[in-house]
Amino acid sequence: MKRLRHAVAIAVPAVLAVGAAAAAAVLATAHRVVTPSVRRNDTHILAVDTGAQTIELDRTLDTELPGRYGLFTSGTYGYVKLGAVLGADGGKVRRKLLTQIESGAQVDRDAAFSGWYYVTPGELHLPWESVLIGSPAGPCPAWFFPGSSDTWVIQVHGRGTTRSECLRAVPVFHGLGMPTLVVSYRNDGEAPRSRGGSYALGAAEWRDVDAAISYALRHGARRVVLMGWSMGGALVLQTAVTSGNRDRIAGLVLDSPVVDWRTVLRFQAREEGLREPLPALAMSALENTFTARLSGAEEAIRFDRLDMVARAAELDAPILILHSEDDGFVPADASHALAAARPDLVTMPSFTVARHTKLWNYDQNGWTSAITEWMAARGLAPAAS
């Protein structure tokens, strides 16, 4: 025990200085940062009217949003699609069901509101195939949607989700004639698990994205556009400054991206009622090899390397950032800071009201136009007729 305390004292005296109980809290907080999350129920189904095909949910900032969404449920249905808000009263919101629920079906009370909308590639009614991308982590499953262009789009999903998150964007790129790879990466539940099974917040996962670029180049792509959702944005940005294929990266599209992890983790800590210095100490623990491993990380995480505002000068591809001011999970502050640091590269149209990764759901026309117009302006796709 003395040897352990001595080692920790050398590694992170700041952690030990707060006491044993606080040190345990620091390590537990750090562990949550790098541990792949699972979907959490965040609302309740209060009533289903199978005659009118409507559903009542707890009223939250997400469930009251206009637009099309999905709902993870249990019972007879695993996932249902939701349409327009028909009414909201006190703590309840009533929405139109776009998935028909039959009379007598069992739908359990606990549910999770989702922006995915589409779950499987077949729902898009477009040609597609499953492929495997060989990465340093092992064979990573991907969906490939063919197109006529030699500029491919590679889509990267966010934290605690899967490839399905990206399906909303496929029809936009298909309409531009652009082939699309929707990829997985280590520890996301579909791609291979790394030795420790933990997230590196982009510091390691970018290699799986880079492998997808190499796959595209071997299969007919001349250049690629990388699209990242939430934490996928962090992976894409790391790829853009680190990849040996960076000269083939023609552009980045970032939806609700993590641009600087410190900004995100401090915000989320405040939202959960965690006060300083706990978040700062947790990040310090992850930066030290010894305490990072105690926290469950495989290697130390260098947050300076993941701060793309500080590294803005290293970027050289044009960037489109789609980020709602009302994101509520990944604040838009760092996105604005990157736009301010590189106005020559970054285009950031204004979006409000939409919550995290739900811009397509809330304003599909505005979101689609932002992408297609940006692509056309940079010669990455034909101009809309």
Image (cartoon, helix red, strand yellow):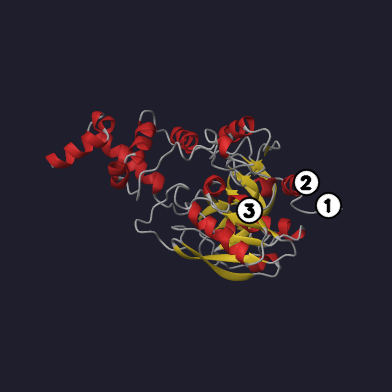
- Residue labelled with disc 2: 373
Task: Left or right? Give the position of 303 relative to 371.
Answer: left
For residue 248, the mark is 3
x and y percent of residue 24 in the render?
27, 39
First-in-chain label (2 vs 3): 3
SS at mark 1 in the image:
loop
SS at mark 3 in the image:
helix
**Which residue is farthest left?**
2
Q: Quadrant of the N terminus?
A: top left
Marks 2,1: beta carbons within 8 A: yes
* Amino acid type, label 2: Glu
Q: Residue at x 61, y 66 (%)?
A: 218
Separation of marks 2 and 3 at Cα, in angstroms: 21 Å
- Residue labelled with disc 1: 384
SS at mark 2 in the image:
helix
For residue 208, above or below residue 346: below
x and y percent of residue 383 in the render?
82, 51
Separation of marks 3 and 1 at Cα, in angstroms: 24 Å
First-in-chain label (3 vs 1): 3
For residue 332, above or below residue 224: above
Classify residue 60 by image quadrant: top right
* Amino acid type, label 1: Ala
Q: Is residue 97 visible?
A: no
* Amino acid type, label 3: Arg
Q: Residue at x 54, y 39 (%)?
A: 259
From the viewer's side, name the closer residue of 348 and 39: 348
x and y percent of residue 336 in the render?
61, 32
